[in-house]
Amino acid sequence: MQERQLATFGGGCFWCTEAVFLELSGVESVASGYSGGHVDDPTYQQVCRGDTGHAEVIQITYDSQQVPYATLLEVFFKTHDPTTLNRQGNDVGTQYRSVIFYHSPEQQESATEIIALLNEQRVFERPIVTEIVPFEKFYPAEDYHQDFFARNPRQPYCAAVVGPKVEKFRHAFAHLRRQ
């Protein structure tokens, strides 16, 4: 029996995170969008200005019988830098913050535990600054942002930034890739 669940993560540009999670076995769908702000139905331009409070996020629908939430967290932490505040590479601003919007107390607990473990094991050179906050609302991004990397692999940002992240995922998580 399928156990459909939602996970909502912000790890910088949503084109990168969406492309990675679309390749993970057990993930049914990934939508790029915005969460964590104070403006209803924000546009990409508003979010990019950094004055809506939203983060660029992905919302993942997954089968928890095939891929547990802990595995999603492992992929999340290994495919972005959770130690930089409001920044991923050249993408700078609160809209690019590292954030987990939890949908249940169990997700909150899992996220808190993995961050404590990663910090304790000093997996990263600096402490993790990823926010863990309750999920409130998800606003899907404009249609042209959905499946962006798959539709635009030669676009300069995709070729330089998204493609290498996807390759890193493919190498590190070959055993978890969709067949």
Image (tube, helix red, strand yellow):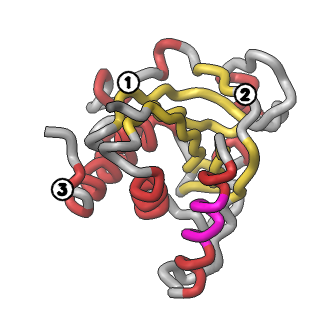
* Mark before the other along the chain sequence, 2 or 3: 2
> Which residue is farthest top?
143
Location of mark 1 (residue): 147
Left or right: 13 with respect to 153?
right
In the depicted structure, whether residue 159 falls above or below residue 126? above
Q: Which of label 2 and label 1 is nearer to you? A: 2
User: Which range is magenta?
Assistant: 109-115
Q: Residue at x 64, y 78 (%)?
A: 127
Location of mark 3 (residue): 174
Query: For the residue labelled by badge 2, is the local secondary structure a helix, a strand or a loop?
Result: loop
Q: Is residue 117 magenta?
A: no
Q: Which of label 3 and label 1 is nearer to you? A: 3
Q: CA distance from mark 2 to mark 1?
A: 21 Å
Left or right: 50 with respect to 1?
right
User: Front-most of 117 and 125?
Assistant: 117
Q: Residues within 10 Å of mark 2 (few under 14, many from 20)?
A: few
Q: Position of residue 152 (x, y in %)?
A: 32, 25
Location of mark 2 (residue): 137
Q: Are the residues at dot 2 and dot 3 in contact (C-beta closer than 8 Å)?
A: no
